Image (spheres, coloured by chain):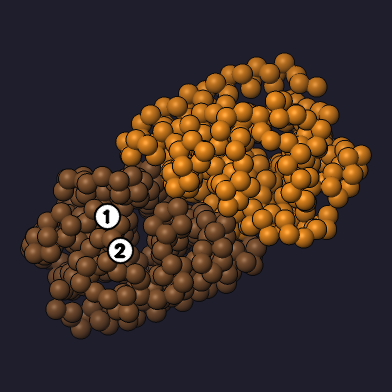
Chain colours: A orange, B brown
Amino acid sequence: MKSKELTDFTQQYRSLIEQYLQQYLSSLTGNPYLIKAMSYSVMAGGKRIRPLLMLAVCQDLGGKITKGALTAAASLELLHTYSLIHDDLPEMDNDDLRRGQPTNHKVFGHAAAVLAGDALLTNTFAWLASADLQPTELLKMVEKLAQAAGAQGMVSGQMSDILGEKKKLTLAELQRLHQQKTGALLLYACQAGTILAQADKKIEKLITEYGQAFGLAFQIYDDILDETSTTAALGKQVHKDQAEHKNTYPGLLGLDGAQVSLKKAINRANQAVSQLQQLGYDCLLLKGMLGYFAI
Amino acid sequence: MKSKELTDFTQQYRSLIEQYLQQYLSSLTGNPYLIKAMSYSVMAGGKRIRPLLMLAVCQDLGGKITKGALTAAASLELLHTYSLIHDDLPEMDNDDLRRGQPTNHKVFGHAAAVLAGDALLTNTFAWLASADLQPTELLKMVEKLAQAAGAQGMVSGQMSDILGEKKKLTLAELQRLHQQKTGALLLYACQAGTILAQADKKIEKLITEYGQAFGLAFQIYDDILDETSTTAALGKQVHKDQAEHKNTYPGLLGLDGAQVSLKKAINRANQAVSQLQQLGYDCLLLKGMLGYFAI
């Protein structure tokens, strides 16, 4: 399902995002141990899905991928990395392995891992605000990103996740949790792409539908992989959710039920793509990115 | 040394800042336990020095304290509170008491305290970016704040502090550490005040000198209090720095030496005030605020 367009796009921009990240981290002059801890996790070989999604939306909507757009995209990866470092902490999910490597606190210690996360979160905004884009666009992105990532978004989802470990959630509660924990940041990536492309309200609405469905599919897919894959393949411990009685889609719906839900989410995203195509946008990249969830 | 102007100003604006904080926290719709943990520490009776300093600079420079300015000032208190919550964590300073109350992790648990801090830090930027001010002004504030608080500022200082516990620092190293850990945020408060007042470069330079000296005085004063005060008076454990062989000004210079350094810092701040007065700004508030460090 992966088109040549998407393969070329991913190759080109993933490597540019890596370069931007590497350059930004090298430019920081703070405590060397802190910067080493930050760089360790940022450069640990993530797929860069959020920045790529932002740029894919921008390009599919006819926007130009400028240096400013690349800065906005790459800065999002700092924030995503902070969330992984803090999620892995002993008092959170207590994970030892991430992307096939020891987690941040295992290498740098507990305090340094908290601080590396704090610094990555904070510097996301410093970097984003410095991007070569219009002030009004940038300010909208800062506000949307902070809302998506903060007390009403990602952090709220993580809190519910931790509290929810002690009880069985309903499907509606689980969806709300993941909408905040994983969905909000993916949705922001899409919305930031529409800001970069200066799309109108109608387009923005369709991209929001795509982004919401994408986020849902992403989480269901992740839950399914946790059940069906191996540690070697994923680079992190598997069957962990199940062992910890975590609320997951397969846990609530069974593996077959989860796969049906995944297909429904992908269909919803495809519907938004079809509507965008009727408006004259080919959306080759956005359509292709749904191939990510092939099972 | 506290003038009537400063007393009136502090009374009026401290209560407005409290109102703004209370209203903002009540408006959040995320996980209730998370919001409770955030509110607990934000509304724990801080002196609101950073927001007051920002507004004092604005007013002393002839700027108007608008609703937008109050939002910018109050949002800084969210970020300051996050830094206190994370500093108190077991893996950091491991403090049980803050402002006379049990610390956040003692009340809400370790994971919730990390998340409450994360959310306060993130929502600082959401709130600031939403303030009713010019986009270019706001964007400058977002960037300066994130730089002051992040990997090259406050978080770097905290990292150096923790690593420094194992060795004796030189005076220059200690000053650098505190410039980042405490000074950077106080300096931002001053700089944001100049942005609000739309002051020119010359004024900005003098306010920066004031802010740097204020930050230094603040930390030396805090170190001296830790040696000479009681737990009842401070609402937190005292003589703790000494017990933990922490690097402090009295530890490096003796109590007398620290007091001499404090006076020097206050003098430097007063010199900046004199120069501003020669330019026609009475600076009653900024002069009065140095009375905070009376020993």
Label 2 amino acid?
Lys
Compare residues A2 and B245 and report the one nearer the observer. B245
Rounded to the nearest whole Å, what is the CA distance between mark 1 and mark 2? 8 Å
Q: Quadrant of residue B279?
A: bottom left
Q: Chain of mark 1?
A: B
What number is the disc on residue B215?
Answer: none
**Residue located 88% across and 40% down the image:** A255
Q: How many marks?
A: 2
**Residue located 19% across and 66% down the image:** B224
Q: Are marks 1 and 2 in contact (CB under 8 Å)?
A: yes
Q: Quadrant of the N terminus of chain B?
A: bottom left
Q: Is residue A251 visible?
A: yes
Judge left or right: residue A123 versus residue A97: left
Q: Identify residue for label 2.
A: B240
Give the answer, above or below, for where A38 lies relative to B221.
above
Q: Hey, which residue is sitting farthest front in the picture?
A: B243
**Residue located 30% across and 57% down the image:** B244
Residue A196 image point, x, y percent: 57, 37
Judge left or right: residue A167 versus residue A115: right
Compare residues A25 and B96 and report the one nearer the observer. B96
Compare residues B195 and A90 and report the one nearer the observer. A90
Residue A103 image point, x, y percent: 55, 37
What number is the disc on residue B246?
Answer: 1
**Residue located 16% across and 74% down the image:** B294
Label 1 amino acid?
Lys
Compare residues A73 and B95 and report the one nearer the observer. B95
Judge left or right: residue A99 versus residue A264: left
